[in-house]
Amino acid sequence: MKVIGLMSGTSVDGIDAALVEVTGKGYGVKVELLAAHTADYSPSLRDRILAVCANKPLAMADIAGMDDDIAIAFANAANHLGTAELIASHGQTVYHRPPTAQQMGYSWQMGRGELIAELTQTPTISNFRAADIAAGGQGAPLVPPVDASLLSHAQHHRCVQNIGGIGNLTYLPPWDRAGPPPAAIVGWDTGPGNALIDWAVSLFSDGNLTYDHNGDWAAQGHPCQRLIDQWLAQSFFRQPPPKSTGRELFGADYGQRCWQEAQALDLSQADFLSTLTAFTAATIADSYQQLPCLPDEVLLCGGGSQNGYLRSQLQLRLPSVNLMTTDDAGISSSHKEAIAFTVLGYWRWHQHPGNILAVTGARQPCLLGNIYTVGDSVND
Ligand SMILES: Nc1ncnc2c1ncn2[C@@H]1O[C@H](COP(=O)(O)OP(=O)(O)OP(=O)(O)O)[C@@H](O)[C@H]1O
Ligand SMILES: CC(=O)N[C@H]1[C@@H]2OC[C@@H](O2)[C@@H](O)[C@@H]1O[C@H](C)C(=O)O
């Protein structure tokens, strides 16, 4: 089945679209990437999204307009790739509230599927996180079962580490991908990926730069271990999984507090970037201490996998681990999340539950996503 996956993550750097041939059943699924494309948001839409993520209050009319504009941008990104039998659209996360003992979770991905279906004339699945959350889960991360299907190794213990705006890991014990997946697969959000680094780069460059290319700016400074230890003591990092997070926690306010603490210690801008980058690496390495064993291999993906300084900081903290990228295992590290959503959509279409209870903490397996068909077409 030809499926288009559409994803824009917490970096809000654009819409990643992948046209994928998906075959097979359940966890035995296979993918072939046929085409991929990244569509930038217009600067004004990106600014509006970032403002909402930073808690700017909006009137209902503005919310409606933003939902329209995101759906239209997603539909355009899909149309750019040509035709498919199905679209699986993650949408744009604008708010994520993990569940607590007192309150269930909530997560909102804008860019409604019914409009994407209409504009592309293609059945579309969206709203992937809602059912898991209704069942008491975090609603994130959702990609670990797809990682298990596409990236497990028969002999090696692997981790897949996404470094987007937020970081998340999937632990994959050895599995030959035949029969049911091992119960030991786990995954959770490790904390900030590039979110804090991007925030600081934008601040220090007066908005002229959006990220630290290859970590070159950070590499000019020195990490402050005292601050890293102080930040690692924060409750999110001590919380046992299942856990998820977002820009609500690791956003501008968090960055501002960190920068104040750094200035109190006379850190330069380069030292601060170096410290934020090393902190991101430390949160990842710290998470791995909670696994049943350290992995033999870590397969990086997401934009942070292209940050050489971040990689070197991670290798320093995980000296025994073979640091690779998902490209080394046949899955594009730039498009992995869009590819993963083609599989999640394919599973929903074929009525295969998409969540792993040990990952999200949901009470039961769920069919993830709402199906929007076009005109009088039927669901399957
Ligand atoms: N060459 C590079 N050098 C350093 N950093 C890079 C490079 N390319 C991309 N990045 C970083 O990766 C980020 C984008 O990563 P990605 O697209 O994986 O995030 P996302 O999908 O939006 O986030 P999430 O996975 O949290 O939803 C950019 O904002 C930037 O910080
Ligand atoms: C709410 C939300 O959009 N979460 C994202 C975010 O970006 C990385 C991390 O936080 C992960 O939990 C999730 O995305 C991926 C695609 C996931 O669900 O697996």
Image (spheres, helix red, strand yellow):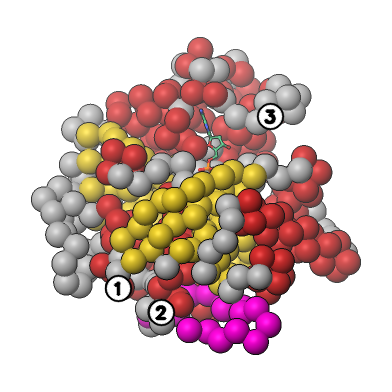
Residue occupied by mark 1: 25
Say which residue appears at 47% left-offset and 16% top-offset: 219
Between circles 1 and 3, the one closer to the viewer is 1
Circle 3: element type: helix
Give residue 44's position: percent from left, percent from top.
Answer: 81, 44
Q: Is residue 308 above or below residue 323?
A: above
In the image, 370: left or right of 222? right
Residue 242 image point, x, y percent: 39, 64
Local SS, label 1: loop
- Amino acid type for the residue under numbered disc 3: Ser
Whichever of labels 2 and 1 marks the residue nearer the N terminus, that label is 1
From the viewer's perspective, is 77 left or right of 361? right
Question: How many marks overall?
Answer: 3
Res 124 seen here: yes
The disc placed on residue 350 is 2
Q: Residue at x 23, y 48 (%)?
A: 158
Q: Dot 1: within a 10 Å radius of its alpha carbon, few (fewer than 14), some, or many (20 or more) residues?
A: few
Residue 374: image quadrant is bottom right
Residue drawn at the location 46% of the way across and 64% of the way down: 2
* 3 or 2: mark nearer the eye: 2
Query: In the image, is residue 371 part of the stretch drawn in magenta?
Result: yes
Bounds of the magenta segment: 365-380
- Quarter of the rendering containing residue 279: top left
The amino acid type found where label 2 is placed reads His
Name the residue tied to disc 3.
202
Whole-number angstrom distance, CA of label 1 to CA of label 3:
44 Å
